[in-house]
Amino acid sequence: MEKSETRRAATPPTHDAGPSAGLDPVALQAALDEVHRAGMPGVFAEVGDGDGTWRGASGVADPETGRPVGPELRHRVGSVTKTFTAAAVMREAERGRIGLDAPIGDQLPESVPGERGSRITVRMLLNHTSGLPEYLPYAFPSLQGFPSSPDLSGKSLEENRYRTFRPAELIGMGVEAPPASEPGAPEGTYSNTNYLLLGRLLEHVTGTPAEEHITRTVIRPAGLRHTAFPAGTEIEGPHSRIYEALYGLIDPPRDFSVCDMSWAGTGAALVSTMSDLNRFYGKLLDGEIVSPASLAQMQRTVPVRTQEGTKTIEYGLGLHRVEMPGGGTFWGHDGTVWGAGTQSLISADGRRRFSVAVNLTRWNKPDSSGRPRPHPIDDALKALYERAAGAEA
């Protein structure tokens, strides 16, 4: 990217009717600006409190032209997709077509054969306790040993930019790799293999491609007008350019706005807006997408190790539980794909909600041991999330 990425090109914030005393537009905009000043090319967000909504942005969507980011832009939202997929599975479970504690091998014996298929249940796929490892290092071989291997590089990201992967191909990579743990282990391991299998399961029980089924049963009923699985390699509609740094291995960071997203599928391929995400999580917690009983199951968490292995999160069935300082318990999901990052959370009572997008990912350069070093963006984003969650400065 050019040095123009550091220029301030903020979009005037938007305030909807019915303002809430819980929203401080000046403080929220200042928090966005801090993320941009810390080195993020562009950041945009929507924050809601009760009936009040604030939208804001800071920085640039295109560092070459100086085009500013805006809060209405469409964005690749990565693993936020998992909540949509989980909701579709729960709806089929309500209809009796999927058993959460049924072995996945009963319905997909060709995908998870033998004893493993008889031990791994649908619930284990949903909460990442299946023991199935991540397929990404095999689909992108230069990522093997992520994040600390001395041989790590961004070579295979570029080589596979336009490659169309088949879900069965990716699932096979994960199933054939050494297991991360035994099925049903007390602590799970986050893995996209689980959510591609859930997509295959949806196709098996509905006779419809998983992306179409999720669109028909979750996205459209929720009234999400700007949310869709990508039809091609480009993001349709107004959007930002997105830049992948891969912990300093891609320097300068490379534009991955155009990319075949078949590698992410029902685990991380969705495109959405911050407004649509807030609407989705609001309707989910209101019981308008799945039943209250299903939501209660989704909110039953277990400890799950993240892909980097650096921390453990509380994970339910497609939902994170996050304790925000000064803001209480929130539910939702985060997501990253090449170049795009998203965080979308809603308070347990449904009153406070926020979604934040950034257009640069994996900005932390490694230390001598290969571990990503802290960066000012980390602190600025943490402060933004806390402010968006309603914590006082």
Image: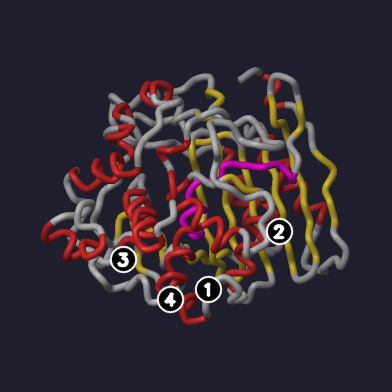
Amino acid identity at mark 1: Val
Secondary structure of the residue carrying tag 1 is: loop
Neighbours of disc 2 within 10 Å: few (<14), some (14-19), many (20+): few
Q: Position of residue 102 (x, y in %)?
A: 26, 71
The residue sitting at 63% across, 34% down in the picture is 40
- Report x, y in % for residue 167: 34, 43
Q: Amino acid type of disc 2?
A: Ala
Query: Please, what is the three-letter code of the amino acid marked with disc 4?
Result: Arg
Quick one: label 1, few (<14), some, or many (20+) residues within 10 Å? many
**Among numbered discs 4 and 3, the one appearing first in the sequence:** 4
Residue shown at the point (76%, 32%) measured from the top left = 68
Return the x and y of residue 14 as percentages of the image width and height: 84, 51
Question: Mark number for residue 122?
Answer: 3
| Residue at point 74%, 27% (across, down) | 7
Q: CA distance from mark 4 to mark 1?
A: 11 Å
Span shown in magenta: 71-84
Q: Give the residue pinned by disc 1.
A: 290
Bin the neighbour count of mark 4 within 10 Å (Cα to Cα): few under 14, some 14-19, many 20 and up. Answer: few
Quadrant of the image containing the N terminus: top right
Residue 18 occupies quadrant: bottom right
In the image, 112: left or right of 200?
Answer: left
The disc placed on residue 393 is 2
Check disc 3 and give the amino acid type: Val
The answer to whether residue 47 is left or right of residue 305 is right
